[in-house]
Image: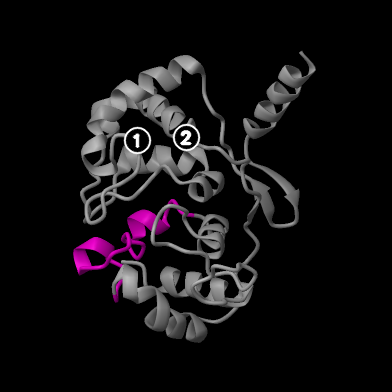
């Protein structure tokens, strides 16, 4: 009984809306939704499986993996809601909002959220540090190998997703980008880039991570 109450308390904390926990640091809204929403979302996800896989495992070259612990721990519900509703121009992800409506979109987000197995991240939304010059060099030397020279991803023959478009960057906060670049996206080719990680692809400092984000923002298209 006590363990059940503790579990409910943890879930309640995860369901809280975006709130500040320290200067520039926030916990994103990751409300898990109701069991009914999850069940309805699972049914609706059949239309998404052609690109994202039946269990959100993704299809390289078609649609990115959604069922990723690190990714889900960093992404707020609004990131998924906005993406489903407005799509990603220039990719296979069309705008589903007009056809699905708010209720179905919310159900889909609840189903995607049901894959989350780790507590939500606290996101650092403080102003970016670093420099555009450093970010440009790091992008060319490291990031462009998978995401393409202009960040077009698959459509630029890259093995990674397109992260250079405004359609993505408009819904991806600096805190979210910091978390994904630093910790990677598990079960994908996107490995960690933090100097503190033993499996890091490149030992990037926080300032270098910020510099890459500056590059993306300055060159969004």
Locate residue 202 relative to residue 146 in the image: left or right: right
Q: Which residue is mark 1?
A: 55
Residue 175 position in % (x across, y down): 58, 57
The answer to whether residue 215 shows anywhere in this view is yes
Q: Are marks 2 and 1 in contact (CB under 8 Å)?
A: yes
Locate residue 55 relative to residue 209 in the image: left or right: left
* Residue 214, placed above or below residue 31: below
Picture residue at 47% right of the left edge, 35% below the top: 115
Q: Nearer the viewer, residue 105 or 8?
A: 8
Picture residue at 51% right of the left edge, 18% below the top: 34
Find the magenta span and give its range.
149-172
Residue 167 position in % (x across, y down): 34, 54
Q: Residues within 10 Å of mark 2 (few under 14, many from 20)?
A: some
Quarter residue 49 falls in: top left
Q: Is residue 171 magenta?
A: yes
Q: How is the image coloured?
A: one colour
Q: Give the number of the disc on residue 184.
A: none
Question: Secondary structure under badge 1?
Answer: loop
Q: Which residue is mark 2?
A: 115
Q: Nearer the viewer, residue 167 or 47?
A: 47
Picture residue at 31% right of the left edge, 21% below the top: 43
Q: Residues within 10 Å of mark 1 (few under 14, many from 20)?
A: some
- Give the quadrant of the C terminus: bottom left
């Amino acid at each position: 009984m006590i363990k059940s109450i503790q579990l409910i308390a943890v879930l309640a904390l995860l369901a809280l809306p975006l709130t500040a926990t320290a200067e520039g640091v926030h916990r994103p809204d990751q409300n898990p939704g109701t069991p009914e929403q999850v069940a309805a979302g699972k049914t609706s996800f059949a239309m998404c499986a052609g690109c994202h896989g039946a269990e959100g495992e993704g299809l390289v070259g078609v649609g990115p993996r959604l069922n990723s612990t690190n990714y889900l721990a960093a992404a707020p519900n609004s990131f998924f809601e906005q993406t489903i509703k407005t799509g990603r121009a220039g990719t296979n992800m069309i705008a589903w909002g007009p056809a699905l409506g708010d209720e179905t979109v919310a159900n889909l987000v609840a189903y995607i959220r049901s894959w989350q197995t780790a507590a939500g991240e606290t996101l650092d939304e403080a102003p970016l540090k670093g420099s555009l010059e450093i970010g440009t060099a790091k992008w060319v030397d490291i990031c462009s190998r998978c995401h393409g020279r202009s960040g077009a991803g698959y459509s630029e023959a890259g093995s990674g997703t397109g992260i250079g478009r405004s359609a993505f960057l408009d819904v991806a906060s600096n805190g979210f980008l910091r978390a994904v670049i630093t910790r990677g996206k598990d079960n994908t080719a996107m490995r960690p880039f933090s100097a503190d990680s033993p499996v890091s692809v490149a030992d990037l400092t926080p300032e270098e991570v910020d510099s890459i984000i500056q590059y993306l923002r300055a060159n969004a298209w």
